[in-house]
Image (spheres, rainbow, N blue to C red):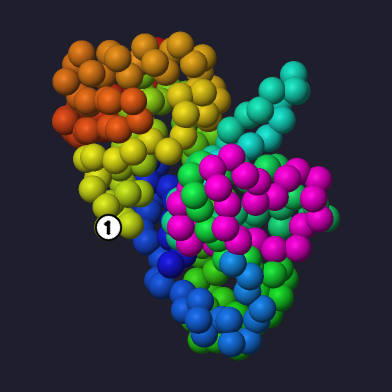
Amino acid sequence: MFTNACSHPAMTPPTVALPKVDIEALKDILPIVRHKHAAGQHLYRAGQAFRAIHLVHVGSYKICDLADDGREKVTAFKMKGELLGVESIGLGTYACDAVALEDSETWELPYPAVMKAAATMPGLQEQIHAALAAEIRCDRSWMLLLGTLAAEPRVAALLIDLAARHARLGYSAKHFILRMSRLDMASFLALKHETVSRVLSRLVDMHYIEVKRREVHLLDVEGLRAMACAQAA
């Protein structure tokens, strides 16, 4: 299922899940390859020839760029039903790296062949266009938010976002595993690793969450939501 990855409470307009796409029907008219990756393995690397977008079928991935100082910069986390490679459409090569955060699997959708094939399936082309547009809007919204929120609201916003995405997949919105490391979280949120750890500890002290290694329980969702909407001074 193609879904909109974006669910931050301060983002407008509200986001909704997109209709289910029949991958089996698409496979009848297009060669679709399944790729499996262990944690830490690359789906693709920046500079590699761009020939496809990918739909996450199982697990999760992080999207990474290289910062000007040579350090890895995490720009997105992608879960089941979300697209990878959208940012590279129109380029000859992939613009960034995609790395599995756990044992994961994707469907490779050859581009632009998938768009031509979609034109023969009622509703599919519109669904794919909507999914592409949603991914782009979400990434832009996070960029804007990270430029306006202080450290605590950033961490709270990420937790609320992950909770909503788990709920859309049919999992618990209040109890989940953080597949990314604290370093990855810090990189994505443009914070120091120590700051992320300190904010998580403060959220525990405030009884907003419980944390045991990567296992998270959300105890006060409304408190987190209010914090996520707070603007930096």
At 46% from the left edge and 57% from the top edge, which residue is drawn? 58
Q: Residue sitting at 16 percent across and 30 percent down?
A: 219
**Kind of residue indicated by mark 1:** Gly
Looking at the rendered structure, the number of numbered marks drawn on it comes to 1
Pick the residue in front: 65 or 213.
213
Relative to 48, is 176 on the left or the right? left
Q: In this rendering, does residue 187 appear at all? A: yes
Snapshot quadrant of residue 231: top left
Residues shaded magenta: 35-60
Based on the displayed image, in which of its 4 quarters is residue 223 positioned? top left
Along the line of sight, which residue is nearer the eye, 49 or 7?
49
Residue for point 77% across, 57% down: 50
Whether 119 is among the magenta residues is: no
Of residue 172 and residue 159, the one placed in the foreground of this image is 172
- Going by the image, does 51 lie left or right of 180? right
Quadrant in which the N terminus appears: bottom left
Judge left or right: residue 12 versus residue 93. left
Residue 9 in view: no
Q: Which residue is mark 1?
A: 170
